[in-house]
Image (spheres, grey):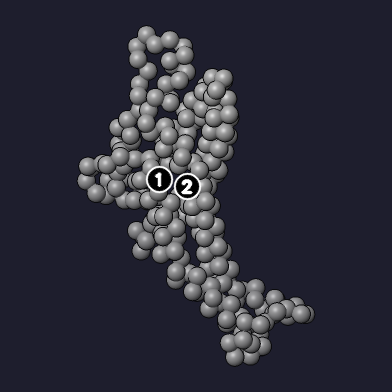
Amino acid sequence: MTSLRHRLATDTRYALLGLPVAMAHFCVAVAGIAAGAGGAVAFVGLPILSGAAAVARSLSDVERVALPGVLGRSVARPSYTAVPGGAGWFRRLMNPLTSGQACLDLLYGIVAFPFSLAAAVVTLVWWAGAIAGLTFPVYGWILARIPGNDRALPELLGLGTGDLAFIGVNTAVGVLFALTLVPVVRAAALVKASIAQAMLTRASYAPAGVAGLTAG
């Protein structure tokens, strides 16, 4: 039971806290690529694109740190080209663009955003449904006495329109959300994590179950 709670807490945290990071990553990628490509002819856009690649690398590192907890195994950070000794200021400025992974870091910010948004929304909906439904017997009696309150669902199911049917059906819906909370949140987290693993990591040969980040 403890491991199940830990699993749910880890997946929930990954899905919800990953959304702000995904939003920032998306904005950096879209703005950086648009500005960089637009000014590339005059060479003004290249430093902008390089800066966006550097920020995208940092945001990708944040994602890589969170992955082991969700996947249950370590991941390896792709290698990035180091700045050569004695390099000039322009070479240092453009260094983030010299790594092949830079393109994937930027592309991930665009590709992953809708999946991050969907994972966060699904997680919030299932948590809200479970909490609201399981606690419905506490406040449902008050709602049942509000004039004009819609009781279409119990009536549609042929359970009548009484207070007991109204509270019972809504509580049952909450129980259904609660019973499916773990697998649904797990699936939402895994979809997002699978995309991040494919685009932001390389193969790791560390033993399964190691929850750590291995630098490449």
Q: Is residue 29 above or below residue 209?
A: above
Q: Residue at 54% x, 19% y: name it.
A: 43
Q: Residue furthest front?
A: 41
In the foreground, 56 or 13: 56
- Where does residue 211 sit, x and y in percent of width and height? 31, 45
Task: State which tag comes first along the sequence, 1 or 2.
Answer: 2
Marks 1/2: CA–CA distance: 8 Å
Residue type at mark 2: give it: Ala
Query: How far from the left and from the top, in percent, is residue 159?
Result: 59, 90
Foreground pick, 214 / 93:
93
- Residue 192 on image: x %, y %: 43, 51
Relative to 47, residue 69 above or below? below
Identify the secondary structure beneath mark 2: helix
Q: Dot 1 corresponds to which residue?
A: 196
Residue, disc 2 = 112
In the visual, does 195 lie left or right of 39? left
**Badge 1 local density, few (<14 within 10 Å), some, or many (20+)?**
many
The answer to whether residue 190 is above or below residue 130 is above
Q: Residues within 10 Å of mark 2 (few under 14, many from 20)?
A: many
194 and 146: which is toward the camera: 194
- At 30% from the left and 43% from the top, the residue drawn is 74
Q: Are marks 1 and 2 in contact (CB under 8 Å)?
A: yes
Q: Quadrant of the N terminus?
A: bottom left
Q: Quadrant of residue 137?
A: bottom right
